[in-house]
Image: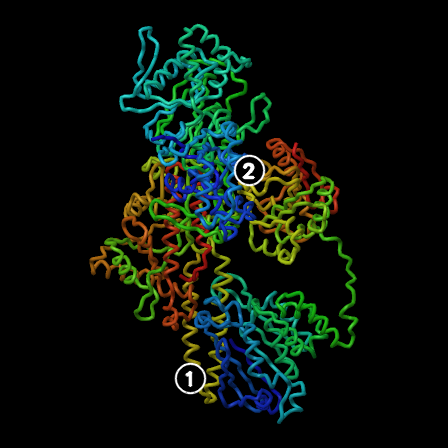
Amino acid sequence: MLLTISTTHVPATDLGYLLHKHPDRVQEFRQSFGTATVLYPEATAERCTAALVLDVDPVRLARSRTRSPDFSLAQYVNDRSYAASSLLGVALADVFSTARAGICKSRQELADTPIPLELRIPVLPCRGGAEVAHRLFEPLGWSVEAEPIPLDDDLDWGDSRYVRLQLAGTVRLADALNQLHVLLPVLDESKHYWQAADEVDKLLRSGGSWLVDHPERELITRRYLGHSRRLAADALGRLAEIGDDPEAAFEPQPVVRPVALNVQRHDAVLAVLDELGARSIIDLGCGGGRLLQRLVERPALDRIAGVDVSSRSLRMAGRRLGMDRMGERQAARITLFQGALTYTDARFAGYDAAVLMEVVEHVDPERLPAFERVVFGRARPGAVVLTTPNSEYNDLYEGLVGPRHPDHRFEWTRAEFAAWCDRVCAEHGYTVEIRGIGDVDPDRGAPTQLGVFRRA
Amino acid sequence: MREINVPALGLVLLVGVSGSGKSTFAARHFLPTQVVSSDFCRGLVADDENDQDATPDAFDVLNYIVAARLRRGLLTVVDATNVQRNARAELVRLAKAHDVLVDAIVLDVPEAVAIARNEARPDRAFGGHVVTRQQRDLRRSMKGLRREGFRKVHVLGPDEIDDVTIGRERSWNDRRDLTGPFDLVGDVHGCASELRTLLADLGWEVEYDEHGRAVGGRHPEGRTAVFVGDLVDRGPDTPGVLRLVMGMVAAGTALCVSGNHEAKLVRALRGADVRRTHGLAESLEQLAGESEEFRQAALGFMDGLISHYVLDGGRLVVAHAGLKEAYHGRASGRVRAFALYGDTTGETDEFGLPVRYPWAQEYRGSATVVYGHTPVPEAEWVNNTICLDTGVVFGGHLTALRYPSRELVQVPAERQWFEPVRPLAAPTADREATALDIEDVAGDRWHDTEFGGRVKVPAENAAAALEVMSRFAVDPRWLVYLPPTMAPAPTATVDDLLEHPAQAFADYAKAGVRAVVCEEKHMGSRAIAVLARDADGAERRFGVADGTTGAVHTRTGRAFFADRAVQAALVDRVRDAMAPLFDELDSDWLVLDCELLPWSAKARGLIEEQYAAVGTAALHALPALADVLATAGTRGLDVGALARRTDRRLANARAFRDAYVAYVRPTDGLDGVTLAPFQVLAAEGRLLAVEEPHPWHLERLGRLTSPLLTPTRHRHVDLSSAADRDAATRWWTELTGAGGEGMVVKPAHPVGRGVQPGLKVRGPEYLRIVYGPDYRDAVDELRNRNLARKRGLAEREHALGIEALRRFVAGEPLWRVHEAVFGVLALESEPVDPRL
């Protein structure tokens, strides 16, 4: 991977002083993941270019037992050897640490002065497309050229996620280096996998001066911190302290958001459960346990069970409920276990009510008979509270093509849902009452359909 | 010497005061493991066998052990004083809960002897008053002991205790010694003429008395008839049926279990006030025309019928209304009720008939259960159980099952003799073949496979597979096989190669394999095609009645195309291509192992995300770097080494790009998709994967001509011939030089455990896709790879996959096939270097 930094400041060879690397030498710097080399392909008084070459050997890296700084290096086939990834950001910070700090004993005035710079990166992973590169670099005073690289030069496979990036501007060198250090990982697809609290410090050190006023500071912060919300909030808070107008960062968002549909769904299901007077409830397909969390808050419930087919979801639910630090009495009410809705399971039986919230549409149509038998035939809860999307409503979602979720195996119209409910009731001895959840459209009904089944 | 008998399967309580010699007695007559002693349990929970404070906990432990043993069907002896009624009651309750018989053996010794014995033991420091109290309790108990629920109470006096033999009495239903062959006959209901016809069809010689009445029968091959009960009621000639069956049973050529109709008729004949419905009136009327002597004989016969038999070493169970596994060989009122009336829910349906719990759906036993009771239009296997009541009296058929051949023989009713209360249709629940239970797949499981020994599937692997199986796999009825993973040949040591045919040949030669077949390894996606000839075949053999006629799925059981119409069209195309095989193999269905081509048809996303992205990044970054270095070189900087390395990497990157581009062909839906079949895994009655050598498969498949098919080029190699090996190696070099992925080496003839089912030898250029563009510069490092785990998995998965197919071919229940298939998927979740 390659980065070149050119200047036409006269004398251009002063770049060597600013970078603390002599223009006539080829210098190597060992990194934990490869070798960084600094060399100058051109060094005249009119124009001087420094190149940072980072050589990563993915095979040896993947096989070494030491912790590698980038998750994707675990794969032998990866772009780390070619693209300007977050690894280049790390190498740059290391190799040019003094320059990045803006320190230059012999040319301090020059180090403090914006100079004409040209940065080139032949292959830059650019999450979100070339447009993001413009959004990130232009506010910092760069004129940006970001040209998408095709997936294949000869075959018509469309664009890759890479761009050829060229930045030109008059910028303090230390700022340029810090901006790259922060923005390379922001643009990269795969960010460092560790997220220690000192990441925030690093971000603030590198971005403190220019990040405060960057219109995309939220995007930058969030992406740099790998979407860790806690860290991002911390960083944004501290950025606000740095800025002149701390209020601005905390300005309340004027958007009044409608209550999200999934919250409405939870409210509706809970209301039905209250109505049914159910004291034992099994949430079939509990996922990460959002509904369970609200069920646990209700002391009137004697038994609460959460079932999911994914052990990862169950672990998440366990954490959400705080199962490991819950009192004995509280914990005794709650069971979490792995199960699948196409396998009969004795543990599903014996509950006043079963909740199947946005679950049935994830079952292949040909497996529905098995699903019906497992739930209505064998588990036979006193009541079944089932929600599923109303496909008629989909037209009202702007930009939605196809189902609401890529894993939905089908979505029912109101008539289809009603027909299914009626058949299930006839076969298994239940009665059903169908309702809607969410804002009702006069022609298309509510976004979510709710079936309340009662055992006859 | 006194002889007493205890039930071979049951509970025995020793009853006697402390010092009466129970432990000594138990040790003499029973295995140490059969005896559970309260002293021992007290020691377990208190480190002191005489700590009376620990008694409640000790009995908790004792009861737990007793329960576990009884559940597992083991004779169990309780060595405790058992002098108090309460203590005995708990144990009798345990016996009843496990539907076994319970005997008591009372050791009746004089108080003085017991006290003297205790005094001789330093660990029994309690005084003589304890024994006195126990003696008093025992005396008080003796009178009512027999009424406490014991089958027998054996009281042994002081002289008898040391001079007794204890026999094991097997229960009446235990006829495991009878091994058949059997002809099992469904509900006859007085249809004497049909019965005689059926017996004749089965090859029986029916014997007649001087009045021309059938009074017995024997089979020239020594077969035994087994009647599933309900000989009587409704039909035209109940006495005729009884006379014939009674004769056969008396002569030892037949067995008969009681049906609910016999039980009711017995009560009626005894004068009980029963409703004369459901054909009872007809029986009584017909019997009234018989002699008193016959009526008494018939009454005695029917009254003596037991409710179920366990036959053929435990492999066959016969009960009128079926029997769940926990009840096999057991004896209790509820076992009898189940056997006679079925698992009734207590509800009645709209015709007033009892609603029955579909126990057969949940049946997971290894014994075949044959029964009748519920008329069905056709005898159908459900989880190794079959109902033979095909409603002859209602105008259906009289059905027999030949055992062990499992052949069904039927004769039609001569007419409808009795009007059914409800139409003869199978309850839907009994026809649902997809009845899979979480217990079929979850937890640690050991699978006995016929060709690969016992295979363990750990619980955590099963948990990981549950999501994939339940959310993404095709309907389990189509999923009768999953292919095993395949290990590469042991790592090569020559040049910069990781894999080379020489190691595969050497590996097989070492394992004693003489001939191998080398098959071109197609670079596509592994595909298993499960095809029924038509919708009827799909319903008959796979139990799929929705019109689907097959599936083509991936190695993890997923459908190839998300679009159902495309998926269905693929099945149709493959079936058309395979059409001649259905006839050649005389089968309504086929399972084929194939590769679906091109790779891009399924893996387009992966190719773009993973491979093309890296390729294009390399091909744009490296030339830019080369330019920078060239310019630097002109300045006299020492960048020669870096420049050479960059050139080499650029060449590697070009080779890498060529490697994956070679496996991309344009496809649109199914257009451009081809299939390369290389094995016919199974067909009706034939486990071809095991029965036929690879050359047979390749030859058969090679004869097919269809534009859909891509042939699999192959060579046969005699491993002892250097010329053969060299020629195959040259062939591999040519194949891979021309962009081929490589080859798979398989033993020509099927092999058992301990030999790899196949070894892949991948070409050096193809391996760039696996190990990265520059891997050949790091071959020294990459050679250090551990194949043992992959090889172990390949063997176990192969054993499970073949076992699943074997079970399917043998017509075993869906859950048996599914548990093995699931095992393959579960093992696949084991973390293994994905590059192998």
Q: Is residue B336 above or below residue B509?
A: above
Q: Is residue B134 above or below residue B374?
A: below
Tell me which colouring the rendered structure shows: rainbow
Provide the chain ID for the residue under circle 2.
Answer: A
Of residues A334 and A407, the one drawn nearer to the viewer in this rendering: A334
Q: Where the C terminus of chain B falls, by quadrant?
A: bottom left
User: Does residue B135 appear in the picture of this structure?
Assistant: yes
Task: Identify the residue at image location x=49%, y=28%.
Answer: B146
Residue position for label 1: B640
Mark 1 falls on what kind of element?
helix
Disc number placed over residue B10 in the picture, else none = none
Percent across and percent down for residue A36 are: 50, 80
Percent across and percent down for residue B488 are: 35, 60
Q: In which image quadrant can residue B514 be found?
A: bottom left
Residue position for label 2: A369
Q: In which image quadrant can residue B775 be found?
A: bottom left
Mark 2 falls on what kind of element?
helix
Q: Is residue B655 left or right of residue A222?
A: left
Q: Are marks 1 and 2 on the same chain?
A: no
Q: Is residue B755 left or right of residue A361?
A: left
